[in-house]
Amino acid sequence: MDINHDILRSSGNKIQKSFSSENFINKTKEHIELIAALLSGIIILITWTMGNHLSDSLWVTFHLIAFAIGGYAKAKEGISETIRTRKLNVEILMILAAIGSVSIGYWTEGAILIFIFALSGALETYSLNKSNKAISSLMELQPEEALLINNNKEKKVPVSELKIDDLILVRAGERIPADGIIVKGASSIDESTITGESMPLNKGDDNEVFSGTVALDGTITIKITTKPNETLFQKIIELVQSAQEEKSPSQLFIEKFENAYVYIVLGVVAIMMFLPYLAFGWTLSESIYRAMVLLVVASPCALVASISPATLSAISNAAKKGVLFKGGVHIENLSSIKAITLDKTGTLTNGKPVVTEALFSSDYNAMEIMKAVGAIEKESTHPLAHAITSYCEEEAGSVEDIEVLDMKNISGKGVSAVALDKSWKIGKADFVGKDAASEFRNGAMTTMASEGKTITFVQANDKIVAVFALKDTVRETTKRAISKLKDNGIKTIMLTGDNELTANAVAEEAGLDHYIANCLPQDKVEHVKAFRDKYGNVAMVGDGINDAPALASANVGIAMGEGTDIALETADIVLMKNDLSKITNSINLSSRMNRVIKQNIFFSLSVIAILIISNYIQLIDLPLGVIGHEGSTILVILNGLRLLK
């Protein structure tokens, strides 16, 4: 009952925190730009709907409020950037277009221009905040304090104060705060944050350990070998930051295009205001009127509508099928990938070891062995122990009634205990006797090890009676997904921190084109960059913290839905159902979306060109210009909405 009360109190505290006023204020600040954009849109809609029932002064007031709420952030950004760089930008163009629309009596037009631009800016800010959260998630996994040993006394100190050659103590279950080597003790180390591999490594004297990894079952003393700000884990953080700050060629092109577009439009408008008056005998009012019409029809409203609705429709379509895109640029880039690199554990495989084969001595009862082994391993927290217990309970039934006595955990080797009136040892070959282990069942260990399996031996009363082979199995959807990718002409490469033997076995089973084993996080980044140079456009699929830098370095980063928070935050695409075959479907959707966007851009630019020419030769007035401009916008939106199906 006490445990239940603790759980209830914990849950209550979480709920209270979630709904606290402070939390609400922080969330509001985080999304203030998006809230302002949506609020301005609502005001515009209300004003347009009730236009006939509002007085002129109230109608103008509502529009001014919409302008102020929706345009404040982008106006401030545009003016500040212009002052800083001494260059005009697209924000200034949108402000001038809105002012120009108002100056000739079209308040709603100006307000809509500001609303659309404010909304796109808010979404951009939201994406930036998500990137910053990815870094914060990594920071939280790095311990802030360490237990320093000085003159045989233990003292908690900030990790930042650690120096090379300092000795620190790490107990079972604790996260290692700095890179170093073990000088005393032994433990199974969970290095999934660094290598992504689910199988813990047994480490003892003189073995290297890394910050951010976890000592599972033994107390160890570590001698610091690296400064706290130069650890391997810190390098992962820096790699993610560096990759996220890099601008893609498309981004650079758009920035240059926007800059040129602003000056061209403003230059043509300025010419339009005076040249016809001076050269063609127009009245000054007519020239200014035509210039304002030009400013409105040349605004990028239709171009924005060419891309956004199509992109959002495609993203919505993909979401219904379990694929989450974090932005339009990622779904746009997906169709052009030429190679895809994939992590092994948790991506190609299920991420958890399972017993794939069990062999028993003919002199012993297999059910009795599994009952005893299942009961003993149930007492352990080791991932391999969990897998063995699950297998034994599935094959031999519940082990709850088996009494386990004198349980001992020999760190890095195995466990020993007494059960069913026998003394048992469960662990590695050298723990139960290497020679006897190699001879068991005519050397069955050699065959299973060659298949990339982890071998665990069982000894009863000094005689080996069973062997369990464990493996992280390939997902059922993996082979189908790899086959589809290869049919589309995409090279498939596995990047794994696992050893050569295991990597080769998985690569053959999955049908991959190529694999690279023994990859640390920085190695994966270097390989991804090399493949980008070779193939041009490369995707990376992963699920672990160690995959985050590579996910950020690839043209398109794809995370498995069951992956770590940092992988989900860093990736551009998330496969919510962990189904790799969804990638091929998403590539086809990306191709459709790119075709629709090209159609929309060509159509909208053609309409803008026709409207500009028609305005110049005085074939249209403002009402027709507005109809043409907004009509083209509606048409490209409807074309984009086709991607919902």
Image: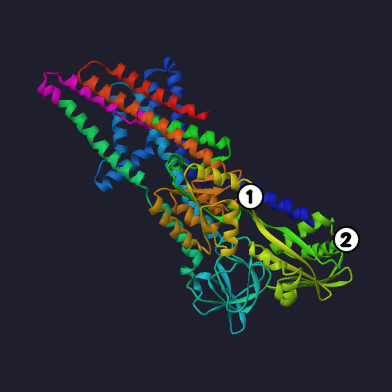
Viewed as shown, does residue 477 lie left or right of 601? right
Type of amino acid at the residue the image marks with label 1: Arg
Residue 496, numbered label: none
Residue 401, numbered label: 2
Instruction: Quadrant for residue 423, please give it.
Output: bottom right
242 in magenta: no
Residue extending farthest to the right is: 421
Instruction: Quadrant for residue 412, please give it.
Output: bottom right
Instruction: Quadrant for residue 294, please give it.
Output: top left
The residues colored magenta run: 275-304
Q: Is residue 232 above or below residue 56?
A: below
- Foreground mark, 1 or 2? 1
Residue 350 at what x, y percent from top left? Answer: 64, 52
Could you say which is closer to the camera, residue 497 or residue 486? Answer: 486
Name the residue carrying label 1.
475
Q: Is residue 225 above or below residue 473?
A: below
Q: Residue 271: tell me if it is visible.
A: yes
Q: Residues within 10 Å of mark 2 (few under 14, many from 20)?
A: few
Indicate the secondary structure of the residue bearing disc 2. loop
Viewed as shown, does residue 507 lie left or right of 637? right
Label 1 to label 2: alpha-carbon separation = 34 Å
Q: Residue 410: tell me if it is visible.
A: no
